[in-house]
Image (cartoon, grey):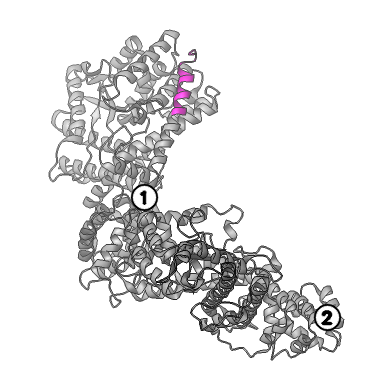
Amino acid sequence: MALSRRQLIAAGLLDVERAERLLGSREFEGADPERLVKGLALAADPDQALMGLLRIAEREPRVVELADDVMAHHPLFRLLGASEALGDFLARHPEHLGLLALTRELEFIAADAEHLRSELLVAVGADPAADTPVASLVGTDGAAALRVAYRAALVDLATRDVCAADPTAAVGWVAVELADLAAAAVEGALAIARAEVAAAHPGLDLDAVRLAVIGMGKCGARELNYISDVDVIYVHSTREGTDEATEAAASTLAAQLIKATTKAVSSPGVEPALWELDANLRPEGKDGALSRTLESHVSYWKRWAHDWEFQALLKARTIAGDRALGEAYEAEAAPFIWSSSQRPGFVESVQHMRQRVTDNIPAAEVDRQIKLGPGGLRDVEFTVQLLQLVHGRIDDTLHVRGTLPALKALSKSAYISREDAKDFGRDYRQLRLLEHRIQLKHMRRTHLMPTAGAQLRVLARGVVEVGAKDLTSADDVLKLWQGTKRRVRGLHQKLFFRPLLSTAARLGDDEVRLSPEAAQARLAALGYADPRQAMAHIEALTAGVSRSATLQRQLLPVLLGWMAEGVDADAALLGFRRLSESLGTTHWFLAMLRDSPAGAERLCRILGTSRMATDLLEVSPEATAWLGDDAELVPRSVKKLWNEISSKLDRHASDPEAGMRLVRLLRRREQLRIALADGADLLGAEGVGHALADVDRATILGALRVAEQQEYAENGELTRLLVVAMGRQGGREIGYGSDADVLYVHRPLAGAPEEEAAAQALRLAQAVGALLQRPLTPAVQAERRLQLDADLRPEGRQGALVRTLDSYREYYERWAATWERQALLRARPLAGDDSLAEAFVEAIDPVRYERGLSEAQTMEIRRMKARVEGERLPRGADPKRHLKLGPGGLSDVEWVAQTLQLRHAAEVPALRVTGTLDALRAATDAGLLAPEAARALEDAWLLATDARSAVVACTGRASDSLPTNRQELRAVAQWTGYGKDRAAALEEDWMRTARHARAAFEAFFYPDAS
């Protein structure tokens, strides 16, 4: 009966023309085409199944009868549609077709390991009951017999796998049987090797040489793939009473046994090799001896083994050879494995190794890697292994090899939550199933997700139970995989970098709690310097049955990891305890901890990195609420700040000191807001400077208003005062705790006596400074008081603190030195009378912008710069680390910008700005500065400014140099976005950036230098 194309398409056949041609082959004469197509529809790849069926029929016509009975023998179609390679094996060896005629259970049940061992030993003519089985088949005959028997068993295994009702649930047992089958193959190969080596050395007693094969990796853990290298380590010894000749040749004989074993499974042959038997995990790797005595292994572990080798030994299991020797090896290795987490830097080395694995994936493969890529199998395996190694030192229940059994043990002991274990296990099985189906097709070692639509569709049909319709398209399987990857990556990051402490996230009070000893071990693994004290803090936070204690118990496992991501985890935990004791019963704090992981994470990291922010949070704990809402971390504008200050002062008009206290409290509050936004990476260096400058401006506005109210109430209003910002405050480029350089300008009211007006202006200026500096009752705790510095006024400290506008105008017109013109480039009215501000700007603009620079003035600037570099650098300071005055530092960048302004602002209006970067950018746009030079200067300015602010934020102390203390430098690296472990990169970047900036500075400043 002819079939329509629609029927063929409905069955899943893609190449319809070829299918029609193949179904018409003489090999299928007498078969019912309709029943064949029904059978093909059960296959993941019907086209492949049809071709495989034809190839087998060419060798063994009986297969057509088997295929014709669809409902009874659907395993044939499932296998041929899943594996072209195993179909080819059956075409070569049709005598094993009977395996496909067996009735298959819907539930996958793994074959007994001893049964598999016996089958493969019998295949090579060895006695499975013998202490040291020796094969009667050797050479190519022995290897071929072993490989055929292995593949026959593999056909049986794969058939049960692809016919399982729930292939995802079955995948763990499939991996167990694959590992047991590989172990049986190694045992059979070793039996061949014994016969061959004994024949080559008739004068030696080979039976006296004991050799154990230790399975490593997935084989050792009984979680092997369909096709993978089988990682092994060998250990040998001799029996008591061994003759001297055999004793002396033991190492040589062991090596020959190993080589013959490897040849039996891995060398080319009529029946293809099984897989690579890989001994590269042995001590010293490829450079080490193939086999060692047990004593030699132990000696190596004591003296030379690396951290990764103990992680690898976690999977060690005797798979072949002398069982007693293998068990002795396992027993000797165990103490080294379970104490390895105490080695210095062990946890970090494991974490870095996982990152290196990812980094070494070719860029074109990263997104396709099921095994090694982000969200892949390695994420699960490394996470589970690290948790085992960290906690297994004190918990024997974790002494298991396989990933899935280990997950079960970790969950049972509450090292991870039941939900996380369930999700991790499900996703691990899903990834393994995808990997198995991809490898099964050609029996090739691959871990890459296919990209072709047809291949993805086959994969989709292969990972569901027989006849399932819920996952059959390429898009479906991609969505499944992407979702699995996202979940795995999230859990990996949560658990791998943040091992839990007493209970896993989201567990309640009724869950089993960990012992204090286990908790302290975890804290030490996370990086807490004083686990005992940390445990005391945790017990204080989690004691009792209150809602606060309940939430703390649920959240602390994650919070502790986030605290450890800062530089000082102990300080972070102490700060967190103080905050919790202040706020633990408030609804919003509990809600933020529970519902805003981003806010909680930010809080923990900032507490572990910033001494300044921690001090401020302790006196303003309510500010922690901002961390859960980015909108709350946006710096307030001057207008908003001034409106709030005005309102506060209006309400306290009768009590100026109380009003001023509120102004200073507002300044402290806003500095904390800026620090938290900075720590949350929401502000760059420019943004921090602008925001801090705006807060200080609003504060000075408030202080001036209070001073005016007090002065005018007592003496009447005789003059108007203007506070003018200079220096970095004028450029809105300040850092945390910066002083404010200012000038004071006044203009007497009409009819006011000049001397009395001047005296009032002086009192006002002094009062503004005093209001910002003097102690208050109650004190403003953790305040960094604002110091006003008027040293840039005419005649410096020897000159009058306050001058009239006319006095400034006359001075600058007649006497202004080049350095004073340079200082005026940053002058910006800050607080006071608006009309006076406009008049002052009109007075100074011609001085700073319109006079240009003569050659003599240019030389004077160069001399001043040289004097600054020679005289102002602090004694003992390393110039290369000095961010302000060192080569390529802020001073170099600012002097270039200011020289350009003095020289060209008359003809380039865009240069009439107070900010350094604004001036550089305007000069570049005008063609006055090469883009490369501008870029070098701007990079240096941004990095220096960022690092300078970070020093204060992290240490609580102002400094213009990169710290030499490594802990402080790590904190600065963390705050500036490098990460605490990349402090050296920060140093290197600064040195390089400063060197480039200095070169640009010298090329501009000294153009005639050779």
| Most foreground residue, 62 or 469 | 62
| Most foreground residue, 369 or 603 | 369
| Most foreground residue, 433 or 740 | 433
Amino acid beneath label 2: Leu
Queried whether the magenta region covers residue 1007, the answer comes back as yes
* SS for dot 2: helix
Circle nearer the N terminus (1, 2): 2
Estimate the x, y position of residue 433 in percent, counting from the top left: 57, 73
Is 151 situated left or right of 888 in this image?
Answer: right
Queried whether the magenta region covers residue 646, the answer comes back as no
219 over 823 or under it: above or below: below
716 over 466 or under it: above or below: above
Measure how far apart labels 1 and 2 are at the Cα level: 71 Å
Is 970 situated left or right of 274 in this image?
Answer: left
* Part of the protein shown in magenta: 995-1010
Q: Which quarter of the picture shows residue 330?
A: bottom left
* SS for dot 1: helix
The answer, for residue 74, to whether it is visible in the render is yes
Name which residue lies at 36% across and 21% down.
Answer: 824
| Nearest to viewer (mark 1 / mark 2) | 2
Estimate the x, y position of residue 636 in percent, counting from the top left: 35, 45
* Quadrant the N terminus occupies: bottom right
Circle 1 sits on which residue? 633
Circle 2 sits on which residue? 23
**Alpha-carbon neighbours of circle 2 within 10 Å: few (<14), some, or many (≥20)?**
many
Amino acid beneath label 1: Leu
155 over 258 or under it: above or below: below
